[in-house]
Image: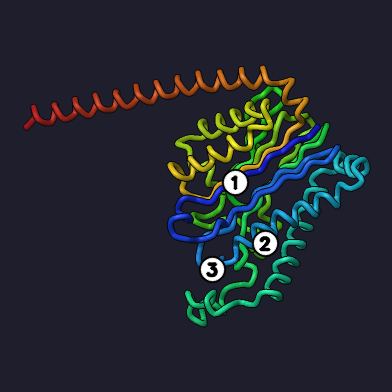
Amino acid sequence: MFKGINVTVKGRSHEENGTVCQDSSGHVTYPDYAISIVADGHGSKKHFRSDVGSKYAVASTIETISEYMADFDAFTKVFKSCPNKILSMIQKSIISKWNDKIVQHLKDNPITEQEKSPFTEQEFNDIKMESYYGTTLIVAVMCKNYSFGLQIGDGSLVVINEMGEVEMPIVDDETHPANVTASMCNSNAIDLFDSFYTFTRPTALLVSTDGLYTSFASRNGFEEYNLITVSMMENFESAENAIQSNLEKRTKYGSRDDISLSIVFDKRCRDSRQGLIESSLEHMKKSAKVEKARQVAMRRKQQLKSSQELAEAEDES
């Protein structure tokens, strides 16, 4: 039985300056598969309708994947024979639906003078219509015998594998130039998607916007958080409130950005692997202690070296 949770919290910085939450998230579960989705509207000036863009990215993804997988057995047969081709087709369909939605939104809601006011006339004329709605998108789909995911822009897709271990199969947006995020609004968006698939049966799939990752001091801390979150699903009914509360703390004391997290899993499969999840958590905590001790030793060694060099310099003078 597939289950899922999605939570979006408004960033503390957005609370303070009165701007809207630009993140969106969603999940859907069906008998044969489940979908988790997050989208992060861009914060820069020219993306002034990105909160709408992120909502449409979530909606377009649900519509596309639900249509492709309506005949689940037929989809599964084709997907297993040519997964990369199918993933490319899904990406194109998501982009097409998203563009249709933003065109209709602009038709129904013409640009206002207030939206134009931060720009000179030339500056505004230079902005592409799609950029008003710019957003990232991450989606993960879990089936009984296979799973896949798509990502454009920053954020994270985490797989808890069949051994209860953390994997991040898609590298974050680091290949793009500084301060340039791959986006649904790019003219070459189809070339900017990353994807993964597996024919094993993961324990859980989690997708999150970059406000979550940047609230941690290290990747290890982020990965441990994802594993802890999946371990909490043993008590599914209380998990959503706990996640909501924790994300509110993470934006307040961490990234100060909007944060979205969406999770899907097969409950029976997850519950049967609770022991593996707990063992992985224990291993991660031990590894973190070892790494912390190593860093402390390195700092002390560097401090000692600096002290010796200073003493030698004083002797020479």
Q: Which badge, 1 or 2, comes first in the chain's sequence?
A: 2
- Give the residue at x 62% y 29%: 166
Q: Are marks 3 and 1 in contact (CB under 8 Å)?
A: no
Q: Is residue 156 above or below residue 45?
A: above
Question: What is the x, y in percent for residue 258?
Answer: 53, 50
Left or right: 155 with respect to 179?
A: right
Question: What is the x, y in percent for residue 283?
Answer: 56, 19
For the question of whether residue 12 can be seen, the reply is yes
Q: Amino acid at mark 3?
A: Lys
Q: Is residue 150 above or below residue 120?
A: above
Quadrant of the rendered structure where residue 129 is?
A: bottom right
Report helix, strand or loop for mark 1.
strand
Quadrant placement of the N terminus:
top right
For the question of whether residue 151 can be seen, the reply is no
Disc 2 versus disc 3: nearer the observer: 3
Report helix, strand or loop for mark 3.
loop
From the viewer's side, name the closer residue of 109 and 98.
109
Numbered badge on residue 46: 3
- The residue under label 2 is 188
Disc 3 versus disc 1: nearer the observer: 1
Quote the CA–CA distance across marks 2 and 3: 18 Å
Disc 1 versus disc 2: nearer the observer: 1
- Give the residue at x 50% y 67%: 45
- The residue under label 1 is 260
Label 2 crowding class (10 Å Cα cut-off): few <14, some 14-19, many 20+? few
